[in-house]
Image (cartoon, rainbow, N blue to C red):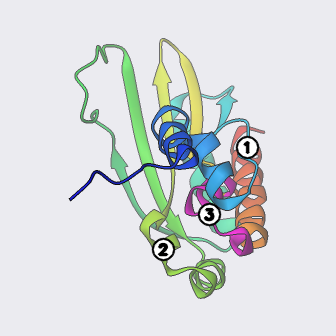
Amino acid sequence: MGASKVRPWRLVTIWLCLMWPAAAVQAVGGIRPPVRPVLAVESPYPLDQTVANLRLAIDAANFRLVRELPWHGGLMQVDRRGTRAKVLYFCNFSMVNDAIAVDRRFSQFLPCRMTVSERHGKVIIKAVDPLYISQLLGNARLGPACYRARNMYLRLMDEATL
């Protein structure tokens, strides 16, 4: 048996997938990736006050707070001295239902979560951009639901930092 020929365009696609994930998403789904996959807003308040404000904003926006956990790091061993953080998990079941009706893979990113962290006196609220998730999944039909979720995230962050 002879060796099969590899088409050049397949090599380029594989290389793009390995080297530039955003370019791979664009090549596969034809969707332009956003500038950043993470939404981040700096808070003028201390960590505990920012978490309390975010809880109130979540409740006022008709989301249900599922749980709140302290964050103690992750898979990588890095210097975390001077860092405190909490992760808030929340959900709006009607928004989730709309997204899952379009693409069941969206459920991998549930419940919604925001991380409030403090390092050296600087408090930041972070969340994964829902538009980035729709583009990672390569499903343009998720766009409107994820756009609404992204705007809601930004409103929650804004309300918690006013």
Question: Residue 12, percent across and down?
Answer: 55, 40
The CA span between labels 1 and 3 is 13 Å
Q: Is residue 6 above or below residue 85?
A: below
Camera-near label (2 vs 3) is 3
Crowd band around label 1 with a 10 angstrom C-alpha radius: few (<14), some (14–19), many (20+): few
The CA span between labels 2 and 3 is 11 Å
Q: Amino acid at mark 2?
A: Arg
Depth order, front residue of 108/91: 108
Crowd band around label 2 with a 10 angstrom C-alpha radius: few (<14), some (14–19), many (20+): few
- Residue at mark 1: 34
Q: Of label 2 and label 1, which has the lower sequence position?
A: 1
Numbered circles on residues, count:
3
Helix or strand or loop: what does disc 1 sit on?
loop
Kindly identify the residue that appears in the image at 73 percent across and 75 percent down.
141
Helix or strand or loop: what does disc 2 sit on?
helix
Q: Of label 2 and label 3, which has the lower sequence position?
A: 2
**Circle number at residue 105:** 2
Residue 132 is a magenta residue:
yes
Helix or strand or loop: what does disc 3 sit on?
loop
Question: Residue 74, percent across and down?
Answer: 28, 36
Q: Which residues are magenta?
A: 131-142
Q: Is residue 37 visible?
A: no
Q: Is residue 39 above or below residue 103?
A: above
